[in-house]
Image (cartoon, rainbow, N blue to C red):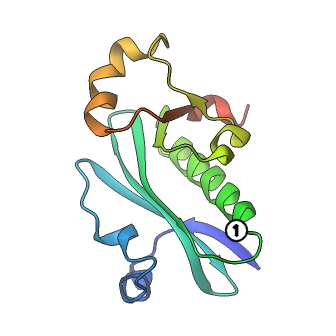
Amino acid sequence: MINFRRLKLSDLDRIYKDKELSPLITTSYKGNSFVVVAELDKKIIGGVSGYSMGNTAFAKKTIVKDIEQRSVYFDGLMRSLIHFLELDGLKYLFVEGGNPLYSAIGFKKLLGTEKFLKMEDEKIQAHFNGKHIYWINVKEFFK
């Protein structure tokens, strides 16, 4: 059975010893860190980590092991992250990369003309190097 949940203290040793998953917890971030994990039959098969600043979250590492139905677990992981961020009161989530699953979930490509950017633009540009930035309004996602 699959379970998407926040990282527990007891997960740290298992993740740290797994070379594929360890970047989830060994990367340092500038704001309040978060990690959401995907657990299949009590084994962690993936996770997403990042940080938040103000009402904005930045997902920086997303890892799902190479298993059957990988894209389904990736989708569930991102939707779970959005849910947890909404519970935490955050408004926007930004990701970098061209994974087509982001669009399928509801992320929009950042064009630079979005109205909310007037308040957030400097923060966003400072946290991403690439041009493929996608965003989603966390508060509106489940409505």
Indicate the position of residue 82 as horizontal and vertical percent values.
58, 46
Indicate left or right for 107 with 111 as reference: right
Q: Nearer the viewer, residue 90 or 44?
A: 44
Q: Is residue 143 visible?
A: yes
Q: Nearer the viewer, residue 98 or 137?
A: 98
Indicate left or right for 27 with 95 as reference: left
Indicate the position of residue 122 as horizontal and vertical percent values.
27, 23
Indicate left or right for 44 with 118 as reference: right
The structure residue drawn at horizontal position 24% and vertical position 60%, both measured from the top left corner, is 28
Tell me if residue 38 comes above or below residue 142 in the rendering.
below
Number of numbered markers: 1
Tell me if mark 1 has few (under 14), some (14-19) or many (20+) residues whose alpha carbon lies within 10 angstroms of its own: some
The structure residue drawn at horizontal position 55% and vertical position 51%, both measured from the top left corner, is 84
Q: Amino acid at mark 1?
A: Arg
The structure residue drawn at horizontal position 30% and vertical position 51%, both measured from the top left corner, is 32
Q: Which residue is mark 1?
A: 70
Indicate the position of residue 24 as horizontal and vertical percent values.
40, 68
Indicate left or right for 114 with 100 as reference: left
**Local SS, label 1:** helix
Q: Quadrant of the N terminus?
A: bottom right
Tell me if residue 136 comes above or below residue 102 in the rendering.
above
Tell me if residue 22 comes above or below residue 117 in the rendering.
below
Q: Based on the displayed image, in which of its 4 quarters is residue 121 positioned?
A: top left
Q: Nearer the viewer, residue 81 or 66?
A: 66
